[in-house]
Amino acid sequence: MNQEILFIQREELKTKPDTSSLGFGKYFSDYMFVMDFHSETGWYNPRITPYEPLTLDPAAMVFHYGQAIFEGMKAYKGADGTIQLFRPEKNMKRFNQSCDRLCIPQIDEEFLLRAIKQLVFTEKDWIPDGDGTSLYIRPFIFSTEAYLGVRPAKEYKLLVILSPSGAYYGSQLSPVKIYVEEQYVRASIGGVGHVKTAGNYAASLKAQEKADANGFAQILWLDAKENKYVEEVGSMNIFFKINGEVVTPRLNGSILPGVTRDSVIQLLNYWKIPVREEKISIEEVYAAHERGELEEVFGAGTAAVISPVGELHWNDHAIVINDYKIGQLSQDLYDEMTGIQLGNKEDPFNWVVKVAQVEV
Ligand SMILES: *Cc1c(COP(=O)(O)O)cnc(C)c1O
């Protein structure tokens, strides 16, 4: 795709929120990227326009049959004013995998990445530079055709919106309490659990609500068939450190292939820490704890980067991990990943993609 990206300027810029009050997903920048699709023309009219509400037909197919997918990534501003993205080509590729599973037309990955860089550069003043802060990037696509028959739509919209986000944890990582869910499931093999489609999150709300009500931070999901094998924690991938070795569930078709997950595996290999991707049952996790070998448990995802688990609650039986303290490996991975993302550490894998250098 070799189209010019049109720029439509807004009359007045918004007042930017205070860095300390950012939180996550509450504020949106001045501009967004938009592009349309029609089966007769392909993707067309790429533009950076003022952030504003959309007008959609009540019969737009997304409201009825849920063709909606998204991505989640971040732009960081380093101490020297370098604006950078972290492995964005992985997100572009996964976006197309989500398109494929939901019968949404493919996008030109290089073009979209170029558009995202252009949008981020336009909005460079929205990238916060406090510790642990970033500009969250949310690309998404949904069907817009007005039609009530069940089939893939012929019209879509692709948008990218930006949201400045605060540090996930205050001043340091803090271990969380997790509920192992046995009644509800997130995803099943053959379904859509391996792609980022809106319905997966709608399906997870009931269990999350139950967990919230009982004082748990997140859900640990088990496999849908046997209710036995560990899949994911909330919307993060999960890792267990057992007797010096790290284990994470193998990608089986119902687990989301996280960019953070892949980065953790590569870092562990680089550090020569044994890591295996394999089926692991919740029973094995509890047995390892029983033997005194369950050293660390942590989630991995773009939002939190690394999220240590302090307690698991399964089948009326709670176990505390590492005395509710942050494990050394969790801390090392967090420091290394955030160091690379901010440009404070060497980037041996060439993960970082530079957008621009601005004055600080
Ligand atoms: C996005 C997501 C992840 C983490 O993926 P990252 O690319 O590391 O952010 C894990 N699980 C689910 C269900 C997700 O939606």
Image: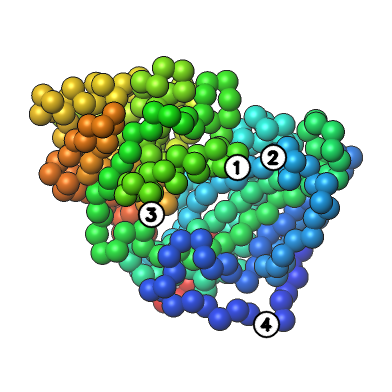
Q: Is label 4 in a helix, a strand or a loop?
A: loop
- The 10 Å Cα crowd at callout 4, few under 14, some 14 to 19, many 20 or more, is few
Relative image position of residue 182 (x, y in whole percent): 39, 28
Disc 3 residue lies near ligand 1 with CB under 8 A: no
Residue sitting at x 17%, y 39%: 320
Quadrant of the rendered image containing residue 147: top right
Q: Is label 3 in a helix, a strand or a loop?
A: helix
Taking the image as shown, residue 356 lies to the left or right of residue 336, namely right
Upstream in sequence: badge 3 or badge 1:
1
Upstream in sequence: badge 3 or badge 4:
4
Q: Is label 2 in a helix, a strand or a loop?
A: loop
Residue 66 is tagged as: 2
Amino acid type at image mark 1? Ala
Residue 269 can be seen in this image: no
**Disc 4 designates what residue?**
12
Q: Nearer the viewer, residue 12 or 216?
A: 216
**Disc 3 designates what residue?**
341
Residue 198 is tagged as: 1
Q: Disc 2 versus disc 4: distance between alpha carbons?
A: 35 Å
Disc 1 residue lies near ligand 1 with CB under 8 A: no
- The 10 Å Cα crowd at callout 1, few under 14, some 14 to 19, many 20 or more, is some
Upstream in sequence: badge 1 or badge 2:
2
Q: Nearer the viewer, residue 278 or 197?
A: 197
Amino acid type at image mark 3? Gln
Q: Is the residue 46 above or below the residue 300 in the image? A: below
Residue sitting at x 71%, y 76%: 10
